[in-house]
């Protein structure tokens, strides 16, 4: 008999490519998994498929020309990125913004945050095998896209903010539409909780899965809902209030142990808080100009650098701009929250099962083009 | 903001008082700016970690006469963003800080591929966003279309 046939089967560690086309890798993420049976020994995210060189483009464009790029990094919360970029340049140049514009920006940014969370909610549940909630979420999200489309002219990559204001004023139809949307979304919570939150299959897929605790988050610079799920109330809208966020009464929802279930609950609770901010902002929306009389086109900030941190839908984001006094920034660096949120998975995925990896990847809400820039 | 003072005072004794500029008005988006030398980088960042700070971002800057690295650390509450600035020569290598902050593992890879600044003792220094066989550094100012290539003192005086 052949000697080889008598040798016992040796279990080897083998590699598996997750992505870049897997539906649960949102964008183009590839994770190189080293597996021992069903268990992950090592996970190495391979990124860069969506690298477009936004930071280099920032140096080649004037401050205003770079505006459309900002909403194409995190395409799910483009308006928040837009908003942050405007704030950074305005702070550098000392441009005053009319009160009405500041409220409009907050309303639109929060609507955008809800739409981003809704998309996450739908796709996450779809990753876990439930198709129906996805349709509900896209139905709701569509209402926001219509509202923002009406006011900014685009559905996804908004370039709505301008230095010293916003591009167009909001009308009564927008305000009424936003009110109607909030009432509608609130009536949906019951459906969402019945369909998903209390679903026993869902609970077993997310409870105690992918725990990111405070220490791990600190080491990897994890921010946003993923950090808040670990019980740290770190939200730049509260800690470092920019724009007019300090005038609104809202809470920062936090979780406990930082598993996928906590992240789920934090994001759901955040949508409700965004609704509260929008309601207050609509109530207090002042009359007046929506944009400065002077239209800033070629701004020349004074020499030096400026960092502006703001809270996007995924966490603490920041623009680091260096000006040499000309119309072009000397350096334009963007701190993106998904960077740390993805990197932490190299630790979290170790020792988990492949099926849980899908649940964990979905639960941290990654937008890969934001990391690739 | 008295609560900010502990770490900033500690950094003052570590790197010398003239190298620390505190800006409590937050007029440039940071609470304090600390100029560090190569030898001071590790102890300074270790002090930040021990005080409960996290590494927000590492950025490179390319000037005609020098490279510069900006390490930004922050903490959860209350806000206290500290920028540590390290001047490094064009061919100088910088010790990795990935043992202090794990997030530096990727951020240093990014700085290396885009600026060509090498980090010593980094366990896995390969391109992060660019293709694996890339042999150029796109954010260096002599690459592609560039509007101005300046000396550091032209901007920071």
Image (cartoon, rainbow, N blue to C red):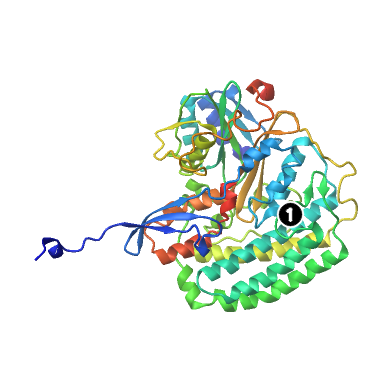
User: With respect to residue B22, does A149 lie above or below?
Assistant: below
In x, y percent, where is residue A67?
A: 73, 45
In x, y percent, where is residue A238?
A: 67, 52
Residue furthest front in the image: A2
In x, y percent, where is residue A129?
A: 50, 73
What is the quadrant of residue A331 in the picture?
top right
Apparent side of residue A237 relative to residue A43 in the rendered image (left or right): right
What chain does badge 1 belong to?
A
In x, y percent, where is residue A53?
A: 61, 42
Apparent side of residue A10 relative to residue A174 in the rendered image (left or right): left
Apparent side of residue A340 relative to residue A17 in the rendered image (left or right): right
Residue furthest left in the image: A1
What is the quadrant of residue A228 in the picture?
bottom right
Q: Can residue A256 be seen in this view?
A: no
Q: Which of B118 and A268 is in front in this view?
A: B118
User: With respect to residue B137, does B18 lie above or below?
Assistant: above
User: With respect to residue A41, does A126 lie above or below?
Assistant: below
Q: What element carries label 1?
A: loop
Q: Is residue B107 visible?
A: yes
Check the picture and name the quadrant holding the C terminus of chain B. top right
Q: Nearer the viewer, residue A192 or A368?
A: A368
Q: Nearer the viewer, residue B130 or A323?
A: B130
Number of numbered discs present? 1
Residues packed near mark 1 inside 10 Å, few (<14), some (14 to 19) or many (20 plus): many
The residue tagged 1 is A158
User: With respect to residue B150, does A255 lie above or below?
Assistant: below
Check the picture and name the quadrant holding the N terminus of chain B. top right
């Amino acid at each position: 008999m052949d000697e080889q046939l008598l040798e016992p089967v040796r279990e080897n560690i083998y590699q598996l490519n997750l992505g870049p086309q897997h539906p649960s890798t949102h964008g183009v993420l590839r994770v190189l998994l080293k597996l021992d049976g069903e268990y992950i020994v090592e996970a190495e995210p391979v990124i860069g498929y969506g690298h477009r060189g936004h930071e280099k483009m920032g140096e080649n464009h004037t401050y205003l020309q770079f505006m459309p790029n900002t909403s194409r990094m995190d395409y799910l919360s483009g308006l928040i990125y837009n908003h942050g970029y405007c704030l950074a340049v305005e702070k550098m140049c000392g441009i005053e913004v009319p009160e009405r514009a500041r409220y409009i920006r907050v309303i639109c940014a929060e609507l955008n945050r809800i739409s981003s969370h809704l998309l996450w909610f739908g796709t996450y549940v779809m990753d876990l095998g439930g198709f129906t909630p996805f349709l509900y979420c896209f139905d709701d999200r569509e209402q926001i896209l219509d509202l923002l489309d009406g006011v900014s002219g685009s559905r996804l990559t908004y370039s709505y903010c301008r230095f010293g204001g916003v591009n167009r004023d909001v009308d009564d139809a927008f305000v009424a539409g936003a009110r109607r949307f909030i009432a509608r979304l609130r009536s949906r919570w019951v459906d969402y909780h019945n369909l998903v939150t209390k679903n026993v299959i869902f609970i077993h897929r997310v409870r105690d899965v992918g725990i990111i605790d405070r220490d791990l988050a600190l080491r990897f610079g994890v921010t946003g809902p993923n950090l808040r799920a670990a019980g740290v109330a770190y939200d730049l809208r509260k800690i470092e209030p920019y724009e007019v966020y300090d005038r609104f009464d809202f809470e920062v929802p936090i979780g406990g142990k930082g598993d996928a279930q906590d992240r789920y609950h934090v994001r759901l609770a955040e949508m409700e808080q965004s609704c509260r901010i929008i309601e207050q902002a609509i109530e207090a929306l002042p009359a007046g100009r929506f944009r400065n009389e002077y239209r800033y086109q070629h701004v020349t900030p004074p020499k030096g650098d400026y960092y502006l941190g703001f809270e996007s839908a995924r966490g603490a984001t920041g623009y680091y701009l260096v000006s040499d006094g000309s119309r072009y920034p000397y350096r334009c660096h963007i701190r993106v929250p998904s960077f740390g949120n993805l990197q932490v998975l190299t630790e979290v995925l170790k020792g988990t099962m492949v099926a849980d990896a899908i649940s964990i990847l979905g639960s941290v809400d990654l937008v890969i083009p934001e990391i690739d820039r | 903001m008295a609560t900010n003072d502990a770490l900033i005072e500690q950094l003052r004794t570590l790197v010398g008082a003239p190298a620390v500029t505190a800006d409590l008005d937050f007029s440039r988006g940071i609470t304090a700016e600390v100029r560090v030398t190569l030898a001071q980088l590790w102890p300074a960042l270790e002090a930040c970690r021990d005080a409960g700070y996290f590494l927000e971002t590492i950025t490179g800057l390319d000037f005609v006469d020098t490279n510069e690295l900006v390490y930004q650390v922050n903490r959860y509450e209350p806000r206290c963003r500290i920028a540590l600035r390290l001047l490094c020569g064009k061919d100088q290598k910088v010790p990795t800080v990935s043992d202090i902050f794990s997030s530096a593992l990727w951020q240093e890879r990014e700085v290396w591929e885009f600026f060509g600044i090498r980090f010593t003792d980094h366990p896995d220094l390969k391109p992060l966003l660019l293709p694996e066989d890339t042999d150029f550094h796109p954010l260096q100012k002599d690459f592609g279309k560039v509007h101005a290539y300046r000396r550091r003192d032209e901007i920071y005086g």
